[in-house]
Amino acid sequence: MLKNLVWGSVLCLLGASTVFGQNAVFEFEGRYWMTNLSAEAKVIEQDRGTDINLKSDLAIADKNFPSGRFSFFINPNHRLTLNYTPISYDTDSNIRRTVEFGGETYSANTRVVASLNLQYLRFGWAYQFVNLAGGKFKFGTLFEVKGVQGDVSLAAPDLGIDNGWDFTAWLPTIGLAMDIIPTSFLNIFAEISGLPAGQYGTIWEGEAGIKFIPFKNFSISGGYRLVDIDARDDPDYARVKLGGPYVGLSLRF
């Protein structure tokens, strides 16, 4: 479902670029994100379930991920952006302590095959109403809808146990976006957005970086990105925090 929304949003952005004419700019950016993971989950059934740390208990290791960013610059003050990041972790190891998940007990040193998968989507509108020095400094609001579709599973093949929890979360968020453009070939940028949703959890995200533009239609970027996802269906929950540097290449049309 989430992948269909990604392609639908891309087609909408492409269609919008024809409506707004020659002054509009469309940009595609591919990124490689080098992340450090912090993740916890709990799934209770029959009053049995413990907090599980996916790194320290299940030996899930850090990984790096590609991501795509589609931006439609309507004019110097308005920008629509679609971000999509597929995230997938897995491990096959002996569990380090006894835990309960989904009503089943996984004893210490039992072989456990575990996975964490996320499809993370953001669609946003940046309105940078502060525009100074001919566009060299821009600052304004960022309105987004963030969506995550994920699952976490634990299986113990030797015990015939296989449990999992699927979750989907959608959340409108607000934030701020800033660009500093000292020259035509350099762009320093930062943005942050999020919103708590009480019993349903929260999603926060922030990034900052530098974009080098050696040619009009091509750029190289680098920066740091942080994502904090807390999906809840009390008493079950999954919390995933990812942070790390990224590098990217982009084309403009």
Image (cartoon, rainbow, N blue to C red):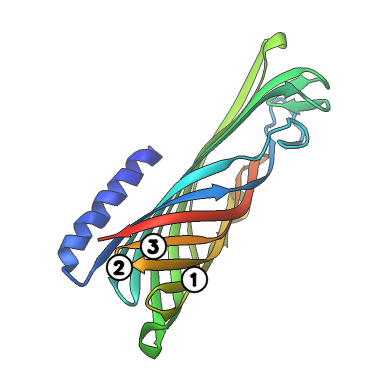
Residue 7: name its quadrant: top left
Tell me the kind of residue under disc 2. Lys
Instruction: Identify the residue shown where x is 16% and y is 68%.
Output: 21
Binning the other alpha carbons within 10 Å of mark 1 as few (below 14), some (14 to 19) or many (20 upward) gives some
Tell me the kind of residue under disc 3. Ser
Of marks 1 and 2, which one's residue comes earlier in the chain? 1
Q: In front: 128, or 244?
A: 244
243 over 91 or under it: above or below? below
Distance CA(mark 3)–CA(mark 2): 8 Å
State whether residue 120 appears in this view.
Answer: no
Instruction: Identify the residue shown where x is 54% and y is 54%.
Output: 246
SS for callout 3: strand
Q: In front: 25, or 125?
A: 25
SS for callout 1: strand
Tell me the kind of residue under disc 1. Phe
177 over 136 or under it: above or below? above
Q: In front: 55, or 107?
A: 55
Query: Circles 1 and 3: CB distance less than 8 Å?
Result: no
Viewed as shown, does residue 116 lie left or right of 215? right
Of marks 1 and 3, which one's residue comes earlier in the chain? 1
Viewed as shown, does residue 111 lie left or right of 188? right
Q: Which residue is mark 3?
A: 219
Q: Which residue is mark 1?
A: 189
Residue 29: name its quadrant: bottom left
* Numbered label attached to residue 227: none
Q: Which residue is mark 2?
A: 216
Residue 49 picture location, percent across and down: 74, 30
Viewed as shown, does residue 16 lie left or right of 187? left
Instruction: Identify the residue shown where x is 52% and y is 60%.
Output: 222
